[in-house]
Image (cartoon, rainbow, N blue to C red):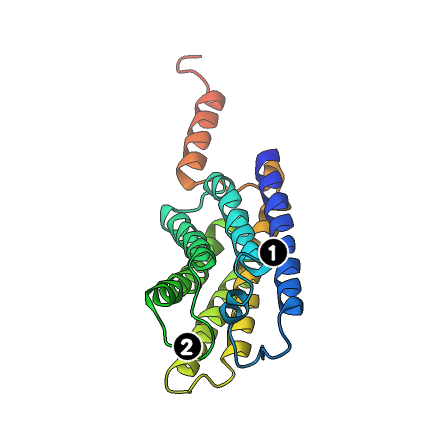
Amino acid sequence: MPGTRNSGLLALGGIALAAVLAVLGHLEVSDDLNPWSLTVSDFAVSDRGGVIDTAMAVLAAATVVLLPALRRAGAGRLAGTLLVAWSAGLLAAAVVPTNEPGLPMDTAAYLHRYASVVAFLALPVAGWLLARPLGGRAAGWLRGLALTSLLLAAVMVWSAYPGDRLLIGLAERVLILAEVAVLAVVAATLAGRRLGGVAVPPEWEHRQLAEVAREVTPARGA
């Protein structure tokens, strides 16, 4: 279906652009910032409204582009809601800054933190739910990446609290890579689909089969 493929391709372009912007955002910051011990948000707050914040907004927009195509592909309402939560969490984290490294957390920083938590948890669960309607090889990739993301999220929580932020920057960046990979698999699967490859909800399939049966069944008394 052309609309499904176009949505997937557009989302892939947005994901690629967001990745490039995120890398540029790391290259432009001060050399005093350590990516292994500081989070992406710590980098972004040093350049408010800069390329890292833009990358987050672009990634959120790329997700929204996928929603109509996923509905056509048979995705459930819960998966769509979780993708909206992921997008909203990204946008909130981009708009509301965290605190500068080393400073005590204020209200904005807490809002930023919990918006990020919602986003990081919502996407892997959505990926797991999308495995069934998308099917094929995508299903295995989505389930594997979803479990990996949740495991990495647990590692990051450990680092943030009992681990005294040990390598929290590394843990977060690997987590982000896994979660963006979930989104990329979804987009690539939709981009590769043609009319015959679009998933059809079971009730539609049963309806079509019933119509075909009526057409080929001989009339009574013929």
User: Is 43 or 4 nearer to us in this picture?
Assistant: 43
Q: In this view, does 142 lie to the left or right of 163?
A: right
Q: Is mark 2 on a helix, strand or loop?
A: loop
Task: In the rendered structure, find residue 18 and report the number of the disc placed on it.
Answer: 1
- Residue type marked 2: Leu
User: Is 71 or 22 nearer to us in this picture?
Assistant: 22
Q: In this view, does 104 lie to the left or right of 30?
A: left
User: Is 7 or 138 nearer to us in this picture?
Assistant: 7
Residue at (41% x, 52% y) in the render: 88
Marks 2 and 1, how far apart at CA: 28 Å
Q: Is residue 112 left or right of residue 64?
A: left
Is 85 located above or below residue 107 in the figure? above
The residue indicated by pointer 2 is: 103
Q: Which residue sits furthest top? A: 222
One can see residue 169 in this view: yes
Q: Position of residue 216 (x, y in %)?
A: 49, 23
- Residue type marked 1: Ala
Q: Where is residue 9 in the image (x, y as percent from the top left)?
A: 64, 45
Q: Position of residue 32 (x, y in %)?
A: 60, 79
User: Is 34 or 121 nearer to us in this picture?
Assistant: 34
Is 57 located above or below residue 47 in the figure? above
Q: What element carries label 1?
A: helix
Q: Residues within 10 Å of mark 2 (few under 14, many from 20)?
A: few
Q: How crowded is mark 1: few (under 14 residues within 10 Å), some or many (20 or more)?
A: many
Q: Position of residue 64 (x, y in %)?
A: 49, 45
Residue at (47% x, 57% y) in the render: 94
Task: In the rendered structure, find residue 119 and report the number of the disc placed on it.
Answer: none
